[in-house]
Amino acid sequence: MNAPLDPKRTLAELKELRRLTSDDNGAQRVAFTKTWLAARAWLKGKLAELPLETHEDAAGNLWATLAGRSETSVLIGGHLDSVPNGGWLDGSLNVLAGLEVLRRVNAQHGGKPPVTVRLVDWADEEGARFGKSLFGSSACSGTLDMDEARSLRDGDGVTLPAALKEIGVDFEGVKKSGAERARAAAYLELHIEQGPVLLDLGLPLGAVLGTFGVERHAITFRGEAAHSGSTPMNRRRDAFLAAARMGSEIYRIAERHSGVCTIGSCVTKPGIVTSVVEECRITLDQRHLEPAPLARMLADARAAADRFASEGGVSASWERIWRIDPVPFDPDLVGLCEESIRETCGTAHRLPSGPLHDAAEMGRAGIPTAMMFVQSLRGLSHNKAEDTREEHLELSIRAFDRLAGKVIERVSGGR
Amino acid sequence: MNAPLDPKRTLAELKELRRLTSDDNGAQRVAFTKTWLAARAWLKGKLAELPLETHEDAAGNLWATLAGRSETSVLIGGHLDSVPNGGWLDGSLNVLAGLEVLRRVNAQHGGKPPVTVRLVDWADEEGARFGKSLFGSSACSGTLDMDEARSLRDGDGVTLPAALKEIGVDFEGVKKSGAERARAAAYLELHIEQGPVLLDLGLPLGAVLGTFGVERHAITFRGEAAHSGSTPMNRRRDAFLAAARMGSEIYRIAERHSGVCTIGSCVTKPGIVTSVVEECRITLDQRHLEPAPLARMLADARAAADRFASEGGVSASWERIWRIDPVPFDPDLVGLCEESIRETCGTAHRLPSGPLHDAAEMGRAGIPTAMMFVQSLRGLSHNKAEDTREEHLELSIRAFDRLAGKVIERVSGGR
């Protein structure tokens, strides 16, 4: 009997896509560019080999539907778009693994599975060009902030609505994409981890518990400029000192609550070698899988900043840049995901996702959702050095297909 | 008997100069500009009322000489130039107090004091336009780095040699100014403190022990960029963390050695909210009055940076920006300075100078040197808010004149 699932074919297709859409600096499938359109055209060619209905929705997302005996559907999602100079797997692994699952389901059920199975290639997951990620999936979920999105511009001043018009999408109508969610009973996504957790554990695969909630702020400390030679240390109101004390403190806060905290930027004014720093602005990004510890991490950071400011005779002011609640995935589906991994490679691990994914938008929209992670070498992504061992990729496709099978079975059983 | 010294006249002249050369943003006597030339022309008018020989030297410094019975000379120095938007006293107090001392000496000795007394208005003490301070006095002392100075450019791309040519100075010949040092037996300078030490002590005047030596470096920490969501805290190589730990450490180092240390600038790369900092460059300015503790402060900072780098899995590289040795002033003259202050206002205090002054160049050239500081309100300078109480200014002129008298007496006695 020919095994209908062929992970090696998916690997060959991933490499074919890499050849078509990468250069010496990595993948160049930035959303809405010619290279991205070429990747989509190539994908449509593959989809055409199966008995699928294929169309692009109101937000530019590509849907391929294998109609089942029931209209209730299981969604499998990914994104062909990449950051500039990106990796070969981020996004496209999900799309091509999903394609392979469609092939297997189609072969197994003679073109008519018990429920409808749909593959979606989301538009502009990365947000590389307009600085706003999850465009297509947030249009579909309904969370897209239209006023904010309307005014987004790329580096050349082109607006998002203008860029969408170029590919035939009317910005004002993008939320009509939400109609695609009708009858969706589950959403599944396979992704590279983009971090070192599975690598450190020596495990190929993990079941994702959900995506971290994020609190993202800028903190500005304001003290007083003073001559570096004539100002005694105890007379200084040093804005950098207060900011610097946050540098170590966020590690204690993250440890206390088992989350992550990052100071990614520090800007000093006047920023000259002969003056105590008058103003220092840092950014703070805090993430946690649960709302309460996330709120406590933020409260701890505020208290620490206030204490350091007060002890240093400076002021601290906060400005929220962005926030999102944690999105826990569906416990039943996470369980099936873990089971599929264990059946495929013996050991499973549950872990949260630090980065956001389209799956979070589907979870927020109320669709029971699960994600599977496959180990990333060096824990890297968004970089041409991003990579995963081929045997792990094959395992991930097998386990993901197994998960899809279990979910189709559960959904068709009405459970 | 009419008191020949009239501190109130000096105050009136300081205010006259302020009216002529300031705007709403402060003093605008930047060296080599029209406003600076106007200030000089105004000064020359005042000098012309006395029996002085006046000329500009090869470096553009203005010398006014009251010939005495001996060619051995006592020098009194200051600078009319200011930073843009500067204060009314920084530099010009010395010049106008020196003018008043010349008037008193001339009156007391009937135009022929026992030794020659000379007032010098140094060119470009501030270095505001070309970023290099002490131009005129370092040309005179011989320490000016000609290769470095030749290539200095202002914000409009004009070179220092071109700017000097505009005022009739041949750059290649500026060190001929050194001839002015012949027969100089002492150099005296009165200056605002530019710091809060005398203010905190509630004292009007202080005797300056010397100028701090300076070690000025850039430290670059290099780690690894990593996703702020997917990278566990214990897997980070965070360049900002190492730099931030230096923020507190320099306070401990400064306290341990009784010096001052300043981190004035911090630059992060990639410097985005969603990435651990890959590279962080800070500047470190360290100052001490004595060479050995200055060297220990630098060694401590190097050891701390290496330790923080090693503990954080990052590298630390150092680049020297500039250094200068401490310049201790002449102990006998510092003693006379303290005595003059005590006789004038009861209490004296000895303190080092954090900022550099032209006096340091004269001290480095081997001329016995002393400086007197007068209290600065709010400890501020280089700012239109720079100020000193009028009664303190009057005391400073009296005490400085007393010092000049003592030094003339000592020099003429051949001691």
Image: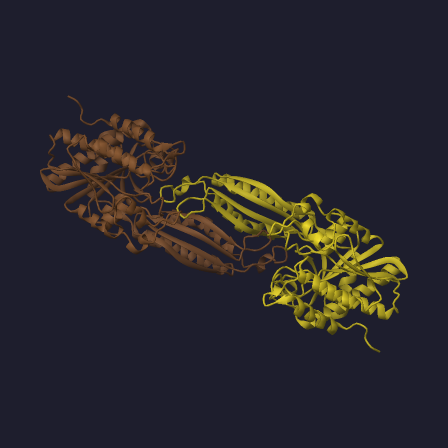
Chain colours: A brown, B yellow
Instruction: Locate the C terminus of chain B by quadrant.
Output: bottom right
Residue at figure coordinates x 85%, y 66% from the top left: B51
Which is nearer the eye, B266 or A35?
A35
Q: Residue furthest bottom?
A: B1
- Residue A294 placement (x, y as % from top left): 33, 52
Q: Please indicate, yes or no, whether residue B372 appears anywhere in the rendered image.
A: yes
Asked which quadrant contains residue B113, the reply is bottom right
- Residue B17 placement (x, y as % from top left): 69, 68
Q: How many numbered markers are drawn?
A: 0
Residue at figure coordinates x 69%, y 71% from the top left: B16
- Residue A319 placement (x, y as % from top left): 40, 57
Above or below residue A234? Residue B272 is above
Which is nearer the eye, B222 or B172?
B172
- Left or right placement of residue A378 versus residue B372 in this view: left
Q: Please indicate, yes or no, whether residue B401 appears anywhere in the rendered image.
A: no
Residue at figure coordinates x 46%, y 54% from the top left: A281
- Left or right placement of residue B70 versus residue B188 in this view: right
Q: Residue furthest right?
A: B69
Residue at figure coordinates x 86%, y 60% from the top left: B116
Asked which quadrant contains residue A393, the reply is top left
Instruction: Locate the N terminus of chain B by quadrant.
Output: bottom right
